[in-house]
Amino acid sequence: MQWSDEGIILGVKRHGETSVIADVLTRDHGRYLGLVRGGRSRVQRPVLQAGNSVAAVWRARIEDHLGGFVLEPVKLRAASIMDDPFRLAGLMTLTALAQLLPEREAHRRLHEASLLVLDQLEADGVWPALLVRWEMGLLEELGFGLDIAQCAATGAREGLAYVSPKTGRAVSLEAGEPWKDRLLALPAFLGTEGGSPDRADIQAGFKLTGYFLERHVMGPRGVAMPEARDRVLGNL
């Protein structure tokens, strides 16, 4: 069996003396693992950095086998931000969280969103808000999307200010006033009104997505949030 696709390197693990197992988020085939022979060589190591885009060919005798990758560079992003801790933390947050996706299930929208975030990493005024939106997309792809199109109490589509931590549904400013201390803030840039977020909005966005990621994904799997995400928050 064989297929070709474009993908994003999410991570690699050493396999034997010279090879690695690459974790790749592909556009049409989803997240795939595969053996890269010679992956620890000087030629291959710069290519197999998390966040890089590659042209991938996957081959296996039987579909259920691990299979092997032949990976060719398309866009090498990692090298340009390696010396910038803030941007590197953003890249590592995305690639680590993307590894929560189930294997071999196509997530084309999230793949495209990942490219959007990664291609904006040199614009510090842009990518943190995009990463929050990406985390919202990840929740949706995992089956835990938030319902923030209208107020759960009144049906209003304007003036949305909160999200219920129990239901993941939006609540308007007026309807949520009596319980605002128990609700999560919904920054305007994530809602129907959009707008340009400031630092406080982005922090509120990360708090919102982080709450539901912890509740629905990290907690049940017994895994911790990536340390890189804490570094992003610490440098906003």
Image (tube, helix red, strand yellow):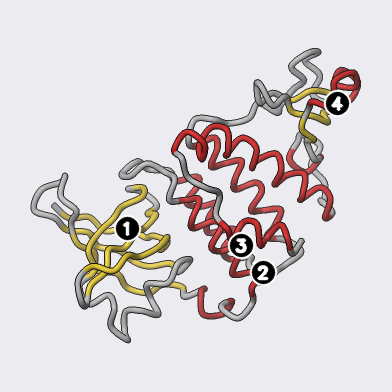
**Residue extending farthest left:** 61
Circles 2 and 3, Cβ within 8 Å, touching? The answer is yes
Packing grade of label 4 (10 A; few <14, some 14-19, many >=20) is some
Packing grade of label 1 (10 A; few <14, some 14-19, many >=20) is some
Distance of mark 4 from mark 1, alpha carbons? 47 Å
The amino acid type found where label 4 is placed reads: Lys
In which quarter of the view is residue 20 placed? bottom left
Nearest to N terminus: mark 4 or mark 2: 2
Residue hosting label 3? 90
In this image, 235 relative to 136: left or right? right
In this image, 163 relative to 225: left or right? right
Between circles 3 and 1, the one closer to the viewer is 3
Residue hosting label 2? 86
Residue hosting label 1? 5
Horizontal and vertical percent position of residue 218: 51, 40
Circles 1 and 2, Cβ within 8 Å, touching? The answer is no
Circles 3 and 4, Cβ within 8 Å, touching? The answer is no
Circles 3 and 1, Cβ within 8 Å, touching? The answer is no
Residue hosting label 4? 180
Q: Secondary structure at mark 2?
A: helix
Nearest to N terminus: mark 3 or mark 1: 1
The amino acid type found where label 2 is placed reads: Phe
Circles 4 and 1, Cβ within 8 Å, touching? The answer is no
